Image: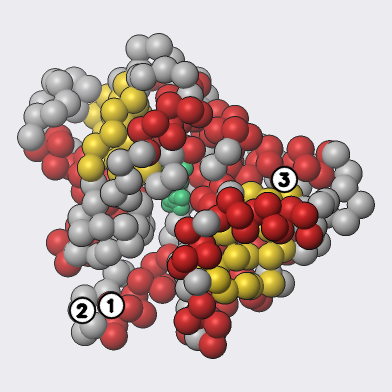
Amino acid sequence: MLLKAPAEPIPIQEISIHHRNIKLFIKREDLIHPQISGNKYWKLFYNINNYLDENPENPYLITFGGAFSNHIAAVSAAGNLSGIPTLGMIRGEELENKWRDNPTLLFAKRNGMNLKFVTREEYRHKEKLTEFLQNGFPEALIIPEGGTNEEAVEGIKMMLNDQTKDFDYLCTAVGTGGTVAGIAKFCEDNQKVIGFKVVDDASLENKILELTSGRNFNLIDSYFGGYGKIKDENIRFINDFKVKYGIPLEPVYTGKMMQKVFELIDEDYFPENSRILCFHTGGLQGIEGANLLLEKQNRNLII
Ligand SMILES: *Cc1c(COP(=O)(O)O)cnc(C)c1O
């Protein structure tokens, strides 16, 4: 088995706030593995372990992602650690000659991932591409963008345990929806799940409902300018948060979720005495790439 459950429980840290006796905590899934971080570890857990248990003769992992994708980084690291060759289908043919300037793609390449750059148009038709690749590599495991499928949702169950049962609200950032679906599927009946949408995708709710049966989750917009866009106010928030609580956040998912959680607390969205748990889903590898962009724009960096 390549990916293992952690020997020690993942720490849950208190974020001390003083408002209506609300207790806010963060579960540090970002600490699960130095290279396969946060929710991506759990989304790959059964995908890769089950695939290897089936003993393909020539294991091969193929997946999809954008230039700064945490999922691409995670799959490349998993492949490198297990000696399985990997292929990443990357959105944007213009990156063909520029991938060395991109820390995520450089990391993937150094992990031995073969990168293939496709146009946005081709990328949009990923189903076709998937079919084509599966015909070409019948033994390959093709993992969808962001890693979301039924096995990924099963893996998210590993983020929940006896300690997480203590909370009224469970919060996570939402990209493709697999993580919030898994939390909603496996949490306790009395717990409320909030997904903080960082992608403006109207079909997300239905996609999540296909992966979990209940409607025990709410989606809250948390775009701050759009997917992958970085607002100065969010950089300030992320940097203040790190100074005050010693916990790093990144600007695509966790930084936006956490800023929105603070806003909701201020707006009295949560009742008095609420116990809130936010999942730190990792993705800190993205900070380096974000800072390169910010530097070019002469803006403040993420510390
Ligand atoms: C991918 C990712 C998410 C979103 O997970 P989905 O299952 O795609 O919704 C959240 N946070 C981080 C850090 C991620 O890398």
The amino acid marked with disc number 2 is Arg
Disc marking residue 48: 3
Q: Quadrant of residue 173?
A: top left
CB contact under 8 Å: marks 3 and 1: no
Is residue 300 toward the left or the right of residue 204 in the image? left
* Residue in the foreground of this view, choosing between 93 and 26: 93
Disc marking residue 294: 1
Which residue is at 68% across, 69% downward?
113
Q: Is residue 119 above or below residue 165?
A: below
Which residue is at 7% across, 35% downward?
267
- Circle 3 residues within 10 Å: few <14, some 14–19, many ≥20: many
* Residue in the foreground of this view, choosing between 222 and 284: 222
The N terminus, quarter of image? top right
The C terminus, quarter of image? bottom left
The amino acid marked with disc number 3 is Ile
Q: Is residue 161 above or below residue 197?
A: above
Give residue 258's position: percent from left, percent from top: 26, 46
Which residue is at 72% across, 45% downward?
48
Residue lying furthest left: 267
Decide if ligand 1 comes within 8 Å of the CB at mark 1: no
Residue assigned mark 2: 299
